[in-house]
Image (cartoon, rainbow, N blue to C red):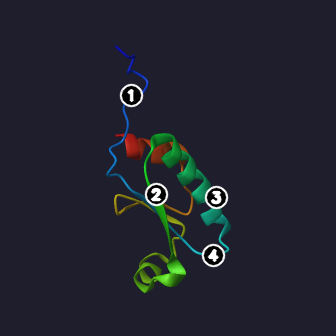
């Protein structure tokens, strides 16, 4: 029998999705993307990014707050992304 323990530690379900809402030339957005890539990469959670300049609805809703991170379509944070807090949101 194979030792399965490392592969089967608590992992988030595959239907989780992190969305980073950003705009071009935004240094806070770049910082947020580094954290999102790291946490999602570590946990195997898919993520996407959306450009606020290409979506009127996102622009109207989030312009004052970008970068904005959504977890499963709900706002998780804005401006600065805390790695530990995002990791906790995806594993709880």
Which residue is depicted at the point 38% across and 40% down?
Answer: 91
Q: Which of marks 1 and 3 is in front?
A: 1
Q: Residue furthest top?
A: 1
Q: Residue furthest front?
A: 1
Disc nearer the start of the sequence (4/2): 4
Answer yes or no: do the residues labelled 1 and 2 have beta carbons within 8 Å? no
Disc nearer the start of the sequence (1/3): 1
Q: State the SS at label 3.
A: helix
Answer yes or no: do the residues labelled 3 and 2 have beta carbons within 8 Å? no
Residue ID for mark 3? 31
Residue ID for mark 2? 47
C-alpha span from label 4 to label 3: 13 Å
Disc nearer the start of the sequence (3/2): 3
Residue ID for mark 4? 24
Residue 43 lies, in percent from the top left, at 46, 41
Residue ID for mark 1? 9
Q: Nearer the viewer, mark 4 or mark 1?
A: 1
C-alpha span from label 1 to label 3: 29 Å
* Mark 2, other Cα within 10 Å: few <14 / some 14–19 / many ≥20: some
């Amino acid at each position: 029998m194979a030792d399965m323990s490392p592969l089967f530690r608590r992992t988030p379900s595959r239907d989780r999705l992190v969305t980073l809402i950003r705009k071009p030339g935004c240094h806070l957005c770049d910082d947020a993307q580094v954290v999102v890539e790291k946490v999602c990469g570590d946990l195997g959670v898919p993520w996407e990014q959306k450009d606020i300049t290409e979506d009127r609805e996102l622009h109207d809703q989030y312009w004052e707050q970008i970068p904005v991170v959504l977890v499963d379509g709900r706002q998780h944070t804005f401006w600065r992304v805390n790695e530990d807090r995002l990791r906790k949101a995806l594993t709880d």
